[in-house]
Image (cartoon, rainbow, N blue to C red):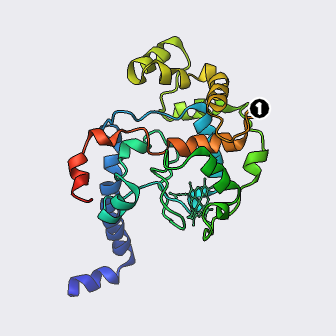
Amino acid sequence: MIKHESIETNAGLLIVLTLIVISIGGLVEIVPLFFINDTVEEVEGVRPYSALELRGRDIYQREGCYLCHSQMIRPFRDELLRYGHYSLAAESKYDHPFQWGSKRTGPDLARVGNKYSNEWHVAHLVNPRDVVPQSIMPNYPWLLEADLDYSDVQDRMRALKMTGVPYSENQQEFERNVAEFGPAIAEKLDILRAEETLMQQALANDYDGQRSRITEMDALVAYLQVLGTMVDFSKYDEGYFADFR
Ligand code: HEC
């Protein structure tokens, strides 16, 4: 009692002791981050976004989709039943900034890839109520009108490369990617060929249903369709899931 009073009535001592207590808490949170590369385990299939998907992700951020949608499935029974396998740290290791989010006005989107057709996404983004009558999601009709600006996509990839995303800019890095991701994907991660591979992916898949153009819709749907599809979970824990079903 007495000791406590002497601390509380002595501002200098109180400040020093407070700082000590806070820095212990801080260290507990910060120190593990120094070892983050060892902490995030490698998971087969996880790869950086292609140029087109990356532009789609930028549009996702520009439009503020994250304000209503999280991308992080928590390891709880109800979440597993609704969305699928819980999110792994490795699945967002190339996401800068990550899109985990903290608000779910709409459903989690971490595994929305391949859940719907491209046509569904286009109709839904133009006017959600055309496909989900009770939806309160806003309309994004301009995505179908706006031509995708990909003149700066190389710079965007270079910026991510600086944060550690393995896009390639020379033969040596390209070969490293071939060894790690296989030739087809390594090609999509090559900064020097970014515009070309972006066009190829958009035209081959025709995400927005307008063959002659590459719109912002193409990029956003390409991004949505890849979410949660990189890791093949059927290989891992069928048994684990069977318990829930
Ligand atoms: C104001 C909140 C809000 C914003 C902003 C918003 N959404 Fe939604 N979204 C919802 C709600 C609510 C639903 C559920 C009803 C529906 O399917 O429309 C939904 C559903 C979805 C679904 C279907 C998910 C599923 O599993 O059925 C997708 C995909 C989606 N939104 C993508 C987007 C994208 C992309 C953006 C940004 C361009 C966006 N949303 C912005 C609220 C929002």
Q: Quadrant of the C terminus?
A: bottom left
Seen at 36% across and 65% down, the residue is 19
Front-lying residue, 177 or 203: 203
Of the four image quadrants, the one with ligand 1 is bottom right
Let me know if residue 35 appears in the view.
Answer: no
Q: Quadrant of the N terminus?
A: bottom left
Q: Element at badge 1?
A: loop
Front-lying residue, 124 or 26: 124
Q: Position of residue 82 (x, y in %)?
A: 39, 61
Q: Position of residue 50 (x, y in %)?
A: 56, 32
Task: Answer above or below: position of 228 versus 196.
Answer: below
Seen at 62% across and 34% down, the residue is 52
Amino acid carrying mark 1 in the image: Ser
Q: Position of residue 122 (x, y in %)?
A: 66, 49
Specify whether 37 is left or right of 129.
left
Front-lying residue, 131 or 37: 131
Let me know if residue 191 appears in the view.
Answer: yes
Task: Answer above or below: position of 141 versus 208.
Answer: below
Q: Position of residue 175 (x, y in %)?
A: 45, 14
Specify whether 172 is left or right of 82.
right
Task: Answer above or below: position of 219 versus 11.
Answer: above
Q: Quadrant of residue 40?
A: top left
- Label 1 environment density (alpha carbons within 10 Å; few <14, some 14–19, many ≥20): few
Seen at 32% across and 62% down, the residue is 25
Residue where numbered disc 1 is placed: 212
